[in-house]
Image (spheres, rainbow, N blue to C red):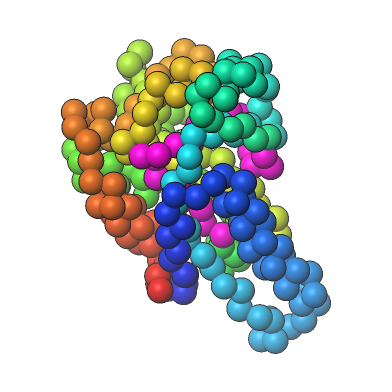
Amino acid sequence: MVKTNFIDWGLIDYQQAWDKQEVLLKQKVDIKLVERDLPINLKTTISNELIFCEHPHVYTLGKSGSLENLLLDESSLMQAKATFYKINRGGDITYHGPGQLVAYPIIDLEQFFTDIHKYLRFLEEAVIKTIGHYGIIGGRFEGYTGVWIDADKPTARKICAMGVRCSRWITMHGIALNVNTDLSYFKNIVPCGINDKQVTSIAKEVGNEINFKEVSNILKLEIAKQFEMDLV
């Protein structure tokens, strides 16, 4: 079991959360750079953090994304009471807002495994198990990251988006699970650059608003199980 600090930032401005992630990432990377030539037994055990939060309305564009997938101009963004950031994760454009559960693992993958694809699949599996608690059958869509409903059907719809960054095996950014999310905000973008698929939420799938704290607790435990984390 890998000791991991669980932190709940609550509702937090996106820029503030991004800055705090960068500080944590730099601290860990700096330790690795200083100690890279030391024997294993003399190296510092780098701390791991699993951070949960929500954001006010915001659109973020990853490194591989296209600005054309944002369908609002600056005036329309203000009317929607939303902000926009170009950021340093992978992936295209997505939306974050109240009612969406965001998880940022800032972890040293060398304490778990050194395989970024396995890392993504483990995060997906934790979400699949979480929504399964609500009778929702999630799965993967070949060629795409994230968690989908009816991925092999014309009714395919995305319930969880993913985008990560990894530097010297330290991760940041993460996943965004739609719980009670206002899905109308997705109409202002081409979500993840995919223009022929829908977006959904746990609330939409089950037909009623969901206890957000309950989902948070379930996802926390499922991530811990998947990665064999000892959450403190």
Query: In x, y percent, where is residue 122?
Result: 44, 50
Q: Which of the pair 98/204 is nearer the observer? A: 98
> For this rendering, which residue is in front, 67 or 169?
67
* Screen quadrant of the C terminus: bottom left
| Residue 82 painted magenta | no
**Residue positioned 54% across, 34% down in the render:** 58
Residue drawn 39% across and 45% down?
Answer: 101
Q: Is residue 134 above or below residue 61?
A: below
Compare residues 23 and 157 and report the one nearer the observer. 23
The location of residue 188, given as percent across then percent down, is: 51, 18
Q: Is residue 41 visible?
A: yes
Q: Position of residue 68 (x, y in %)?
A: 66, 16
Determine the residue positioned at 57% across, 72% down: 47
Side of 191 relative to 88 (left or right): left
* Magenta stretch holds residue 97: yes
Residue 154, placed above or below residue 226: above
Q: Can residue 145 be seen by looking at this rendering? A: no
Extreme residue in the bottom direction = 42
Q: Is residue 180 left or right of residue 107?
A: left
Span highlighted in magenta in the image: 87-106
The quadrant where residue 29 appears: bottom right
Give the x, y percent position of residue 55: 48, 43
